[in-house]
Image (cartoon, rainbow, N blue to C red):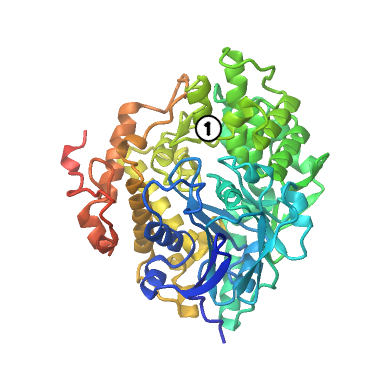
């Protein structure tokens, strides 16, 4: 017999020191499933517009989905309002913590944390409830904090304690992170050092076990599964370089002549082994020994800390990645912060002895950022946009909605410009990565918009179930068969569920003041010969995107589309919506 799907939420108020279990409305479970979708519904319901993300009034949710514990390579979602961008934020992490969280929460699909503790605390989860306990690891790095507990831990490092706006939540001795957007800073602002899951993952019945084995086998035989088994994510740096979309040396260049030193072959030579998925039967990324400890560098490490900082030595890049992990900072944002400082020093905006291919200089600045120990480190701890506003050099490193870009350069793939511009949490390649198809196809504005919309809706469903990005590709019907096996309510068409979730998040961001003026080309990209970016083509693609979404010309969801998605009654008086959809005949 299958375990009943969880239908409750565990609410922890750190100001009051209380823990309560409450039911989740049935309509919310059906319309938003879990993970991203359910987190969006709670934030939209409970946050007043303009709430300071670092205030006690912000919410931080650790959420699972209806398929958590059953799917291979599980994930959990950290959902909050971002201190970096001011937008909705959902970040995901895998490893051992999601399974232990699932077992420890019992009938609860997640944990909602509000308020702020007077002194640093940890939450110990077991048997479907939580204990608020003093945290004796405050001041220790993320790896030390993980190692100090008997249970499976999600925690912050010094960056989270010091409210660095792109601090992460780390687990598995920092092998996994809920990364971009600063969920770790929200955790630090609440004086919550760690969440400790003490129970084993749950067991499931024969039907789910059969589905798990079937889809795991299908994934192993898929193109993506074979690629990951052979190379992990580190081969993305080689792909990006070959495709002409790898940003290098602080976005001054496209393509990196040192890729061979930080790419897949260098990783294989340096590796001491491979990580594995939760079942131990699929190899993941490569384990590497560094002076800071063992680390598992992923594709973003080589792209951002390698090519982005002009470093072509794999050991130096791996060590910088491990420094970021232990400090608890998102390495994409941190790498861009260091790159900004290098470029700012070159043009005289700041007085700093730092340059590209300078691992020691990068290490020193990362420590200053995590500790906010110098004026430069303090400025960069709030992101490159804030540093540029304070110090100058606004166009040195590109951002969208104040989030620095990952290293897929839109100058080589115009579809990535639209994906970054319309991402719901700032410049993010995880919402949509059309570059993987665009480099092989000839797209116009309509095809570009359609590809981005499809990816955003599909991934909204996966992140609400919650399924891994890659393994989720083999879920037939986006996972309907799994939901039926569990007896979990759902739409007949889960793509519609994904569209509903994407629109709800857009409503949250619109209520916070975001509109078309924020869906922009990244500022700060110097033109290259053969540049794929064309402002007129971008505007045409954005118009096609709004039309495909059923939004108005201002980028707000229309009443007509919201009604079709059963969202119109959810909209509050503080959220402006479009009265009419964009007329495709008016597009340029």
Spot occupied by residue 476 in the image (x, y as percentages of width and height) = 46, 67
Spot occupied by residue 485 in the image (x, y as percentages of width and height) = 49, 79
Spot occupied by residue 454 in the image (x, y as percentages of width and height) = 38, 52
From the viewer's perspective, is residue 248 above or below residue 29? above
Is the C terminus in the top left, top right, bottom left or bottom right quadrant?
A: top left
Is the N terminus in the top left, top right, bottom left or bottom right quadrant?
A: bottom right
Residue 66 or 87: which is nearer the viewer?
Answer: 87
SS category of the residue bearing label 1: loop
Q: Which residue lies furthest to the top in this view?
A: 348
Q: Image point 47% across, 35% down: which residue?
A: 402
Task: Please identify the quarter of the rendering in which residue 33 is found.
Answer: bottom left
Residue 92 or 329: which is nearer the viewer?
Answer: 329
Residue 83 or 517: which is nearer the viewer?
Answer: 83
Mark 1, Cα crowd under 10 Å, few <14 / some 14-19 / many 20+, is many
The answer to whether 316 appears left or right of 210 in the picture is: right
Task: Please identify the quarter of the rendering in which residue 492 is found.
Answer: bottom left
Q: Can see residue 312?
A: no
Q: How many marks?
A: 1
Q: Image point 25% across, 46% down: which residue?
A: 547
Q: Image point 56% across, 31% down: which residue?
A: 246
Spot occupied by residue 383 in the image (x, y as percentages of width and height) = 54, 33
From the viewer's perspective, is residue 128 above or below residue 562? below
Q: Can see residue 507?
A: yes
Q: Mark 1 points at which residue?
A: 245
Q: Image point 66% across, 58% down: which residue?
A: 121
């Amino acid at each position: 017999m299958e375990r009943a799907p969880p239908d409750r939420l565990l609410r922890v108020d750190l100001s009051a020191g209380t823990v309560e279990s409450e039911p989740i409305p049935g309509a919310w479970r059906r319309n938003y499933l879990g993970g991203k979708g359910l987190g969006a519904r709670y934030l939209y319901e409970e946050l007043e517009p303009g709430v300071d993300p670092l205030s006690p009034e912000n919410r931080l949710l650790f959420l699972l989905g209806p398929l958590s514990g059953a799917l291979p390579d599980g994930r959990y979602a950290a959902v909050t309002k971002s201190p970096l961008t001011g937008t909705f934020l959902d970040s995901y992490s895998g490893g051992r913590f999601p399974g232990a969280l699932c077992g420890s929460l019992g009938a609860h699909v997640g944990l909602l944390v509000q308020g702020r503790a007077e002194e640093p605390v940890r939450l110990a989860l077991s048997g479907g409830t939580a204990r608020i306990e003093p945290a004796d690891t405050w001041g220790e790095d993320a790896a030390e904090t993980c190692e100090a507990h008997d249970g499976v831990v999600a925690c912050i490092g010094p960056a989270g304690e010091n409210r660095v706006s792109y601090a992460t939540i780390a687990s598995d001795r920092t092998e996994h992170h809920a990364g971009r957007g600063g969920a770790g800073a929200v955790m630090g602002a609440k004086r919550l050092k760690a969440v400790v899951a003490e129970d084993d993952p749950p067991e499931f019945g024969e039907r789910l076990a059969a589905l798990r084995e079937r889809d795991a086998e299908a994934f192993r035989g898929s193109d993506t599964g074979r690629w990951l088994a052979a190379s992990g994510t580190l081969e993305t740096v080689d792909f990006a370089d070959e495709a002409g979309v790898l940003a290098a040396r602080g976005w001054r260049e496209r393509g990196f002549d040192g890729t061979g030193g930080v790419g897949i072959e260098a990783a294989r030579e340096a590796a001491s082994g491979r990580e594995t998925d939760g079942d131990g039967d699929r190899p993941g990324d490569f384990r590497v020994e560094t002076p800071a400890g063992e680390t598992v560098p992923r594709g973003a490490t080589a792209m951002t800390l390698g090519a982005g900082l002009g470093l072509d030595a794999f050991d130096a890049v791996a060590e910088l990645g491990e420094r970021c992990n232990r400090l608890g900072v998102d390495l994409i944002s941190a790498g861009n912060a260091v790159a900004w400082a290098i470029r700012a020093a070159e043009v005289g905006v700041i007085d700093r002895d730092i340059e590209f291919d300078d691992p020691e200089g990068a290490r020193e600045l990362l420590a200053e950022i995590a500790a906010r120990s110098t004026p430069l480190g303090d400025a960069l701890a709030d992101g490159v946009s804030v540093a540029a506003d304070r110090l100058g050099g606004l166009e040195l490193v590109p951002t969208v909605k104040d989030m620095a870009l990952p290293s897929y350069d839109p100058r080589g793939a115009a579809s990535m410009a639209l994906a970054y511009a319309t991402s719901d949490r700032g410049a993010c390649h995880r919402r949509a990565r059309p570059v993987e198809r665009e480099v092989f196809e000839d797209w116009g504005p309509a095809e570009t918009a359609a590809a981005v919309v499809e990816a955003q809706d599909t991934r909204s469903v996966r992140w609400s179930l919650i399924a891994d990005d890659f393994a989720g590709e083999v879920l037939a019907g986006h996972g309907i068969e799994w939901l039926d096996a569990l007896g979990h309510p759902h739409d007949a068409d889960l793509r519609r569920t994904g569209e509903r979730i994407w629109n709800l998040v857009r409503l949250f961001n619109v209520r916070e003041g975001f509109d078309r003026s924020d869906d922009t080309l990244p500022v700060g990209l110097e033109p290259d010969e053969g540049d794929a970016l064309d402002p007129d083509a971008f505007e045409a693609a954005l118009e096609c995107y709004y039309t495909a979404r059923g939004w108005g010309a201002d980028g707000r969801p229309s009443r007509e589309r919201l009604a079709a998605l059963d969202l119109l009654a959810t909209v509050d008086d503080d959220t402006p919506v479009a009265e009419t959809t964009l007329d495709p005949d008016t597009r340029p």
